[in-house]
Amino acid sequence: MSQQQVEHAIIVGGSLGGLMMGLALSRSGYTVTILERADSSLRNGAFIRLHTKPYRNSEIERELRHLASNGNNNVEAWSAIQERLRSAVAKEPGITLQHHTRIVSVGQNESSAWATSEEEQTFKGDFLIGADGYRSIVRRYLSPDKPFADYAGYLAWVGKVDEHLLPKKDWKKRQLSSAYFNDSAAGKLTTAVMPGKEGGTHLGQRWIGFCWFDHSHNPLLSELGVLKDGIAQHSLYGEAIPDSLLEELSQTSQAHWSKEDDAILQIAIKDRSLIGAPVNEYFPNILSKEE
């Protein structure tokens, strides 16, 4: 890349992958536009463990790994990592992050690539990267014969609750950055202890995250439009979760999980803070496409 001309990258999707890719490209000398369909609110739900050890001797990788992991190997809330990456992107002069931008088509020719939004606005760059999830518009362009991820057959109910809402006698039973795994007739349940609001790590300050793998509601998911012809359309959250389903989840949790785990789930069910995310699998038959 010449010093006179700075190449411009378009990234479709502004979640963790898109934000991290944008930072890596910007710090490598590119200008970047990140297009995200959702608003700027932080995502509730999943938890992740990020490791600080780099894969290779790259200064940019070390910087970004430290940024994403906050310099430790803790299990952390998705939203905490997202917030750090967003903050870094906002300070990066070479990146523009645009929310409320739903991309409906992408294209390319010999000299450029572009993305067009629902409002018919076109964003043009030297190249384009897809980080737009399991219903990827970019994948549909690159691989029209296999445009969608396959539904794996189960839903993941994910969320987190404030530890101080749980019985105080249970606080010491869980260690920071530890994950706990359980199986029952109701599926599989993973819980994890994470730094809480503003990074609090003392007892009562932490978040307890959960991920409940549920394979028992596939017919209902089709009725609710979460699945269409076996393809996942969207997640299930908030008022879109029927009261009858919440009541069923509450009863199932009480019957099949320990009192400590049930207490976590009951809080999330009561305040409708859990998200039902269809789990998807994608095995690419190509990794790139040349015109």
Image (spheres, grey):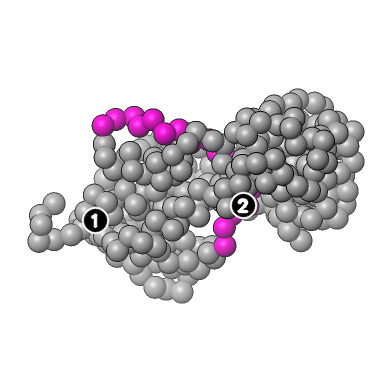
- Tell me if 103 is positioned left or right of 248 in this view: left
Amino acid, disc 2:
Lys
Task: Look at the image and give the residue range highlighted in magenta.
Answer: 41-57
Give the residue at mark 2. 197
Which of disc 1 and disc 2 is earlier in sequence?
A: 1
Marker disc for residue 69: none
In the picture, the disc for residue 30 is 1
Outermost residue toward the front in this view: 202
Q: Is residue 8 above or below residue 182?
A: below
The one of 25 and 162 positioned closer to us in this rendering: 162
Where does residue 267 sit, x and y in percent of width and height? 80, 48
Q: Nearer the viewer, residue 112 or 1?
A: 1
- At label 2, counting other C-alpha atoms closer than 10 Å, the crowd grade (few under 14, some 14-19, many 20 or more) is few
- Residue 114: tell me if it is visible: no
Secondary structure category for the residue under label 2: helix
From the image, give the main secondary structure of the stretch colored magenta. loop
46 falls in the magenta region: yes
Q: Position of residue 166 (x, y in %)?
A: 80, 43
The answer to whether one can see residue 287 in this image is yes
Residue positioned 39% across, 30% down in the render: 53
Left/right placement of residue 106 relative to residue 132 reads left
163 lies above or below 3:
above
